[in-house]
Image (cartoon, helix red, strand yellow):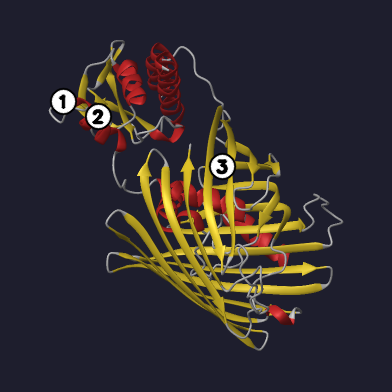
Amino acid sequence: MNMLKYICVLCTVFLISCTGTYEKNQAKMDELYGCKKPGENLSKEKYKACLAKERAGGETLFDLEGNLNDLIRGKDNVVYQYAVNPYLWRAAIEITNIYPLKIADSQGGYIQTEWINNTEDNSIRCLIKIQISSKELITTGVSSNFLCENKVNETWSSDNIDYVEEEKQITLKILEVAGTLEKANS
Amino acid sequence: MKKILLAISAISAAMFSTAANADISVSGSANAVYVDAEGNSQGHVGGTISFSMSTTTDGGVTISTGGQITNDPDAAGGAGNASGMTALTFAFANGSITVADDVAVPAGTGLVGELVGHADSNQVTHTNDVALTTDDGSGISASTSIGDMTLAGTYFYDGGHNNNIDGGTTTGAGASLTIPLGDMSLVVSSSSVDANGTEDSSTGGALTMTAGGGTLSLGIETTSGDTAATEGEAYSVAYSTTLGGASVAVGYTGFDANSNTSQKTDVTVSQSIGGGASIFAEYSNLSGAGAVASSQTLGEGVVAVGTSVSF
């Protein structure tokens, strides 16, 4: 009977909970608890795999590639190191190169287009924001935002629409192009 | 509104002629670890390949599953196995639901001081562990957010992992609630399991906060029910911080159950060396009246030193 109570309470809360804070809360919990995140209840095997990834993601003791380059080529040579994954970055640039860019920060991995006006309807304009957040070519290493505004009485204001599908398409296209670029270079 | 949507569709269609919905990723990890339990030494050399698959429906529901091929990442043997592919997770904007062969109730929430991943091999056991004998099985779990709080619940109907929905002899249910309290975070959980008539329950809480440049966690865990050996409580504390580039964590747990006490101290140090690799050292000591005496193969103090790599 206790189990039924648990299920009923959970289902009720799940159905009425539309606060839209789930992803944000999950991200906070990932950061705070790591492999011991409440609700995950990982098996020992999965916990160890998680622990290995967590430990590998810390601050690096030394950069072996950089040190070897210094030894072999001499310290005067410039060693370019990407702050973000170069394939994701190049893919994002390729995807947005048909639009004027307002910001293209390769170190921060951030791209923002200028407002893109609709030639058929001057009362609508949109822009794209892309954030590359990973040095590795992973699916979670890129996120996109698609924002639009409407002009009402000569004043631009947000249309308050979530363009989830468009943002997903941008992200998937970047991942697709990045994968192609990586294959071509391997 | 229709015009707006048309305009957006035109923009996105011009940019993206093809778009796949499915996402399949492969990752892996491997480790080589030297483990010493007071003279009984062994090596753990192995790894895991993990496959993650997901897709998103037209309605915005993300469905995901995954599987693993594992070969002894934490034992001195050579037998591999495949696992996973027995769970489906449906993620919505306000939560997720998982149907699986191996969902677990939230037991052990308060045991924040248990930190090691390898240095518990060949360690003596204790007769007064504060834990549920079975805490997982075939079932369903769900989580959702209520404001800044996160509620998760699990019900398993077959502790034998055979997906016997109406005939499982071991069943269990539990829920956990995570509550942000300013700079702190509180987790409380409660679970109960009925193993063929033997009923046990577990209640735990953990408070995590920043302190002195690190993270301090305080926890309490209690179990009660028909199994006398695990009836009691445990108090646990952990502190983690970084020294230079290394991550350092210390944990202590005191058990008082089955009319006995025991203490477990864990220490871990890990250092990333770039490229997804890290070197680490772990130490764990379990002692007290509730701990089984050391033998030729089992020790109270266990040391593990090794490297792990994520691909």
Asked where in the image residue B125 lies, by quadrant, the reply is bottom right
Which is more toward the observer, B151 or A157? B151
Q: Which residue is mark 1?
A: A77
Check if mark 3 and mark 2 are on a common chain.
Answer: no
Q: Which residue is mark 3?
A: B91
Give the quarter of the figure containing the N terminus of chain B.
top left
How packed is label 2: few (under 14 Cα within 10 Å), some, or many (20 or more)? some
Q: Examine the rendering and report whether any part of residue A154 can be seen.
A: no
Question: Badge 1 sits on which subunit?
Answer: A
Q: Residue at x 51, y 47 (%)?
A: B94
The image shows residue A117 at horizontal and vertical percentages of 26, 17
Secondary structure state at the residue bearing disc 2: helix
Question: Which of the two discs, 1 and 3, sits closer to the camera?
Answer: 1
Check if mark 2 and mark 1 are on a common chain.
Answer: yes
Residue B12 versus residue B165 in the image, above or below = above
The answer to whether the residue labelled 3 contacts the one labelled 2, judged by CB atoms less than 8 Å apart, is: no
How packed is label 3: few (under 14 Cα within 10 Å), some, or many (20 or more)? many
